Image (spheres, rainbow, N blue to C red):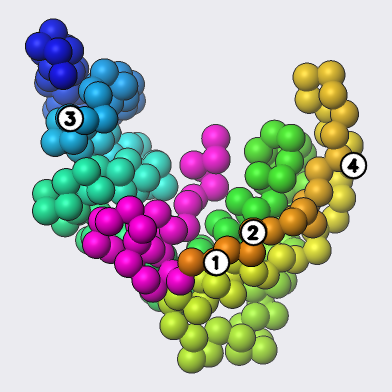
Amino acid sequence: MEYSEKIDSAALIRQGLRELVTHRPDKAIVTFRHAVDAIPPACSDELSRALYWLSVALMRLDKKDLAIRSLASAQKLRRRGYARRVYLRAINEYGMPKQPTPELDDFYAFMNLQMAAYLTRKVRTRFESFSERDTVFSLLIDTWKTIGTKGLLSDKSCGEKLVFFRKLRPEFPNFGITKEAGIILRPTFGTGPRSSTVLDPDSRCVCGSGLSYRQCCGRVSGVSELR
């Protein structure tokens, strides 16, 4: 890192900390993001620190999914640092924000995986109407109830549940043609081809972090991370 770049990033981090202290997490988020952009990837310790404080600012605004994503990146850069300890305390077995009960952990993992699978096959990763949103939510809730009624998760480990959730694809209704940038496209709503390569969620992550794949690079991302 050039000396001037190091000074600039250090100054940005200090500014972000002042904004946190004065209860302005919204401004701190912008500042810490600038700091992250200013730090070269080779400067892992400095980058990990900036990502950690960015996660703190995001958590202050209750943006838990984005905070976990920032923490996940920070802990990969410093495996024995404070960010790793905070990350492991904050996440559940799916690498998501920890919920009050294991049953809720399962439910949120299922919902986020299905919602992400649905939205990423659209031209724009968002709902186009309240009707579309309510229909998709209702279908997923009914699917979840069926899973519980049939006991399909009984005696399954977390890794096995994750594989089951990823393979399951409810039949979503087609909400019609979506227009984007003058091009008319019809979303596939989960009917497209899937990759045949499936990594074992319980195996060590391929990035070398030392964590299981399901808690690291294979963690369940929140829907807010799509935007």
- Which quadrant is home to the N terminus? top left
Q: Which residue is mark 3?
A: 43
State which tag comes first along the sequence, 3 or 4.
Answer: 3
- Which quadrant is home to the C terminus? top right
Tell whether label 4 touches label 1 (CB within 8 Å): no
Q: Which residue is mark 2?
A: 195
Numbered range of the magenta stretch: 200-227
Q: Residue at x 81, y 43 (%)?
A: 187
Q: Which residue is mark 1?
A: 198
Please say whether residue 213 is one of the residues in the magenta stretch. yes
- Across and down, in percent, residue 190 comes to 75, 55
Looking at the picture, does residue 53 appear above or below residue 187?
Answer: above
Tell whether label 3 touches label 1 (CB within 8 Å): no
* Secondary structure category for the residue under label 2: loop
Q: Residue at x 73, y 41 (%)?
A: 122
Q: Any mark on residue 176, and which?
A: 4
Tell whether label 1 touches label 2 (CB within 8 Å): yes
